[in-house]
Image: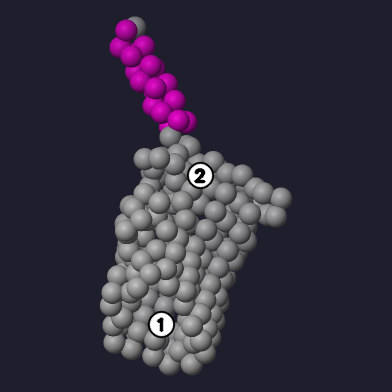
Amino acid sequence: DLYMKKILLLCIGLLMLSNVRAQLKHSKATDGTVTLTLQQTGDLSSGYNQLPQDVKDATKMVVITQSGAQISSEDVKFLFGDWSNLNRFPNIVKLDLENARFTNDADLQWLGLMSKLEYLTFPKTTKEVPQQCLVGKKNNCIKEVVFPANPENRNEVVNLGTQAFQQSKTLSKVVFKKGVGTIGTQCFAQCTALKCVDFYSGTKTIDYQAFKDCTSLED
């Protein structure tokens, strides 16, 4: 009857909507670098289970959000993990987030759960690096961090939170391709391997003990 037809059409519509919703795309370069592209916010959390195992086991990854899409807090649980969720990409050594837009910079605090991460490019839209971003979690091997410029706002600056990289014993190079507002208290304290901090332009504020005991610092 007419009522059952309406129910059937509604079910078909919901099924089609769910299929459209799964927009997480992936590709793999000849050097093994995996690129994940989110078409819509939430694509990573909804599409992770459909990814092939070789993508989940990747060591090099680029994450891109297309226009209008963002990486939500729920997506972050799949990309980095959190205290209640394991990192779903446990082998990542090199991570490029330059063209990934996050709903909330505070979610970057979970980067420290990527235990094998050595080379990190932050999102170009990052304005606030959370305090203790790589502190007290699982990462003990980060070597190089890059903060890319944001072409959409050349005057945009990034602020680094208190103890953001404190005691990152393997961190040797930090590159700023955008302005820096504040480097928080003890941000790089006890980063004993840190040799080079490459600033794009003058820093407004360097807080107390920001570079305390950086015994290898040259530039």
Q: Closest to the observer: 179 or 194?
A: 179
Question: What amino acid does circle 2 point to?
Answer: Thr
Query: Residue 166: horizontal and vertical position, in percent?
Result: 41, 82
- Magenta part of the protein: which range? 2-20
Q: Between disc 2 and disc 1, whose residue precedes?
A: 2
- What residue is pinned by disc 1? 188
**Residue at figure coordinates x 32%, y 59% from the top left:** 156
Q: Nearer the viewer, mark 2 or mark 1?
A: 1
Which quarter of the figure has residue 125? bottom left
Residue 32 left/right relative to 90: right
Query: Residue 97: horizontal and vertical position, in percent?
Result: 48, 57
As drawn, the residue found furthest toward the top would be 1
Q: Is residue 154 magenta?
A: no
Question: What amino acid does circle 1 point to?
Answer: Phe
Above or below, 80 against 212 in this view is above
Residue 136 left/right relative to 88: left
Q: Report the magenta stretch's main SS.
A: helix
- What residue is pinned by disc 2? 37
**Residue at figure coordinates x 48%, y 66% from the top left:** 146
Query: Residue 135: horizontal and vertical position, in percent?
Result: 41, 78
Query: Residue 45: horizontal and vertical position, in percent?
Result: 44, 48
Which quarter of the figure has residue 130? bottom left
Residue 40 left/right relative to 172: left
Display colour scheme: one colour
Give the structural element (helix, strand or loop) at label 2. Answer: strand
Q: Closest to the observer: 2 or 139?
A: 139
